[in-house]
Image (cartoon, rainbow, N blue to C red):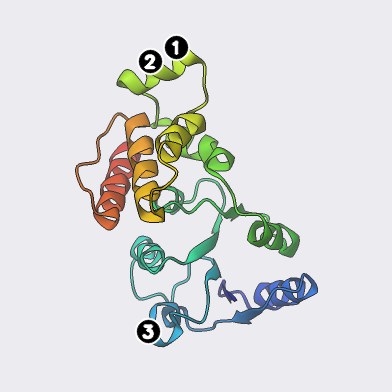
């Protein structure tokens, strides 16, 4: 089930109609904080979300709470200069639809989950302050491989790992590209470290 929660009534209706045309079940959510309520936890797996004034938490914390619940987020942040972009990428939110938003673009994002390679230009070029450093950069230059391939090496090394372990390895791979090191083995704490690293680079 896809929940639609953009706060823009006309867009919500267009998205619901277009999703129905593609045989995808959806519901429009008018109260954003409902997404975090216990009674809604098992009712949806994906949410189409835009920043909204009625969200009680800071938006970055709202995104974090959704990811803690293993929800897939299709984010409509506005333009590519959005202050929310860095937080979204740090949380592994790669399904991002920038302005101008159309129902077709959003439905395509729902049907075709983005990969790291699809957003690397935003992650690595964010504000012009994120770049390769140290041994990670040297290794990329030596082998002439792309950053996303470097990340894939760390996550694909042991095919029998659980999804959580694979996610943790992906975070470690991204942090290595940023010249940082993950010190926590807990997935949520590692995500916080990644978020902090991106924030430091941005600000």
| Local crowd size for mark 2, using a 10 Å CA cut-off: few (<14), some (14–19), many (≥20) | few
> Farthest residue toward the top?
142
Q: Would residue 102 be found to the left or right of residue 91 on screen?
A: right
Q: What residue would you read off at disc 2?
A: 138
Specify the farthest residue to the bottom. Answer: 39
113 with respect to 183 (left or right): right
What is the CA distance from the residue labelled 2 to the residue labelled 3?
47 Å
Q: Which residue is mark 3?
A: 38
x, y (%) of residue 116?
Answer: 52, 42
Name the outermost residue toward the left.
183
Q: Residue at x 70, y 76 (%)?
A: 16
Circle 2 SS class: helix
Q: Report how far apart the C-alphas of labels 1 and 3 lie in the structure.
A: 49 Å
Name the element at disc 3: helix
Image location of residue 83, percent across then percent down: 43, 51
Residue most toward the right?
21
Q: Is 160 on the left or on the right of 96, as rendered?
A: left
Q: Identify the residue at horizontal 70%, vertical 72% (top origin).
A: 15
Place of residue 78 in the rendered image (x, y in percent of width and height, measured from the top left)? 56, 56
Q: CA distance from mark 2 to mark 1?
A: 6 Å
Q: Label 1 crowding class (10 Å Cα cut-off): few <14, some 14-19, many 20+?
A: few
Quadrant housing the C terminus: top left
Marked residue nearer the N-terminal end (1 or 3): 3
Q: Does the residue at mark 2 contact the one at mark 1 (Cβ under 8 Å)?
A: yes
**Are the residues flagged by discs 2 and 3 in contact, CB closer than 8 Å?**
no
Residue 24, x across and y down, in percent: 70, 73
- Residue 87 or residue 110, whichever sits in front: 110
Could you say whether the residue bearing mark 1 is in a helix, strand or loop?
helix
* Label ID, residue 142: 1
Q: Quadrant of the N terminus?
A: bottom right
């Amino acid at each position: 089930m896809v929940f639609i929660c953009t706060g823009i009534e006309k867009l919500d209706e267009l998205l619901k109609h277009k999703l129905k045309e593609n045989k995808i079940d959806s519901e429009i959510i008018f109260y954003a904080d409902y997404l975090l309520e216990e009674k809604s936890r098992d009712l949806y797996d994906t949410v189409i979300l835009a920043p909204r004034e009625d969200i009680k938490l800071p938006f970055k914390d709202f995104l974090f709470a959704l990811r803690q619940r293993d929800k897939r987020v299709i984010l409509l942040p506005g333009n590519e200069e959005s202050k929310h972009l860095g937080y979204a990428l740090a949380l592994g939110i790669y399904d991002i639809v920038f302005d101008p938003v159309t129902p077709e673009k959003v439905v395509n994002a729902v049907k075709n989950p983005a990969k790291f390679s699809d957003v690397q230009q935003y992650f690595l070029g964010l504000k012009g302050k994120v770049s390769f450093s140290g041994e990670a950069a040297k290794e990329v230059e030596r082998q002439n491989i792309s950053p996303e391939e470097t990340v894939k090496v760390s996550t694909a090394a042991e095919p029998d790992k659980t999804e959580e372990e694979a996610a943790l390895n992906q975070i470690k791979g991204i942090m290595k590209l940023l010249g940082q090191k993950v010190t926590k083995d807990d997935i949520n704490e590692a995500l916080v470290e990644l978020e902090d690293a991106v924030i430091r680079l941005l600000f």
